[in-house]
Image (spheres, rainbow, N blue to C red):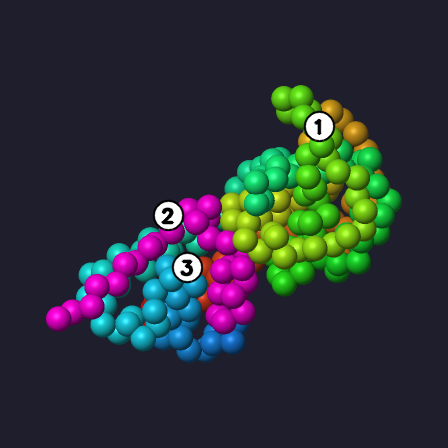
Amino acid sequence: MKQQIQIEVPKDWSAVTLKQYLNLKNDMEAYKDEPDAITACMFQHLCNFPIEHIDSLDVDIHNKISNDLSKLLDNVQLPLQRFITIDGVEYGFEPNLSKMSYGAYVDIAKYEELTIDNKWAEIMSILYRPVTKRFGNTYDIKKYEAVINGTPFLNVTMDIHFGTLFFFISLSKDLQTSILKSLTQTSTEISPSIKSILEKSGNLTHHLSNLQTEISSKWKKSQTNH
């Protein structure tokens, strides 16, 4: 009697947590020269599919899953979400970067670049803090207390993480053309600290291209090698 295994292929990044994504990145880097292992990583981390059963999949099912995952990996340019909920608590993105507290600036500036890596959850814990007051789209968030705890953000889904990263990529593009806007769409000067962080990140436009292909290219390459 054949064992039935449920395959959950994510249709978008709201079904994938940061923890899953980081585990996938780390494993794909470790097995970057092994096409079969890369396929196993994709199926395991994104579909929760047991590695030991991959070879037993029907060819048509295997190809269908592979095609669906390829579409997912090509869609990472997502909008910023100002409000998120973690464990029943509403968090808000820093409402005015030009007035962010000095302590928050200093702590973000410790990171060499803004990229989704093992330190990203800590950056998110600085940028997103519990909402204390809200009037429509106008809101206040908890004062920054220099307590960095990225653990809760490991379970936040990748649509939110990608949205945050691409917000800063957009700022970088605007910085290059001297058209800088705050979240309230009012012309303003971005703080020198934020400018410094963006500049330290290098060419974020180039990084965008790398991000879109970082995992996708390894995955597609592994498929052609089968």
Which of these two is toward me, 79 or 45?
45
Query: Which residue is found at the position 66% from the left and 55% from the top?
Result: 150
Q: Are marks 1 and 3 in contact (CB under 8 Å)?
A: no
Q: CA distance from mark 2 to mark 3?
A: 10 Å
- Residue 66: % across, % down: 32, 60
Determine which quarter of the picture holds residue 88.
Answer: top right
Q: Is 158 above or below relative to 141? A: below
Density class for disc 3 (Cα within 10 Å; few <14, some 14-19, many ≥20) is: many
Residue corresponding to mark 2: 11
**Residue span colored magenta:** 1-28
Residue 12: give its label.
none
- Does dot 3 land on a helix, a strand or a loop? helix
Instruction: Check residue 3 for magenta coloring.
Output: yes
Q: CA distance from mark 1 to mark 3?
A: 36 Å
Q: Is residue 163 visible?
A: no
The residue lying furthest to the front in this view is 88
Task: Name the kind of residue labelled 1 in the image.
Answer: Lys
Residue corresponding to mark 3: 46
Instruction: Check residue 35 for magenta coloring.
Output: no
Query: Which residue is found at the position 64% from the left and 24% from the top?
Result: 137
The residue lying furthest to the top in this view is 135
Query: Which residue is found at the position 20% from the left and 68% from the top?
Result: 3
Task: Name the kind of residue labelled 3 in the image.
Answer: Leu
Q: Is residue 161 left or right of residue 38?
A: right
Residue 133: give its label.
1
- Residue 157: % across, % down: 51, 49
Q: Is residue 46 left or right of residue 133?
A: left
Q: Quadrant of the C terminus?
A: bottom left
Q: CA distance from mark 1 to mark 2?
A: 34 Å
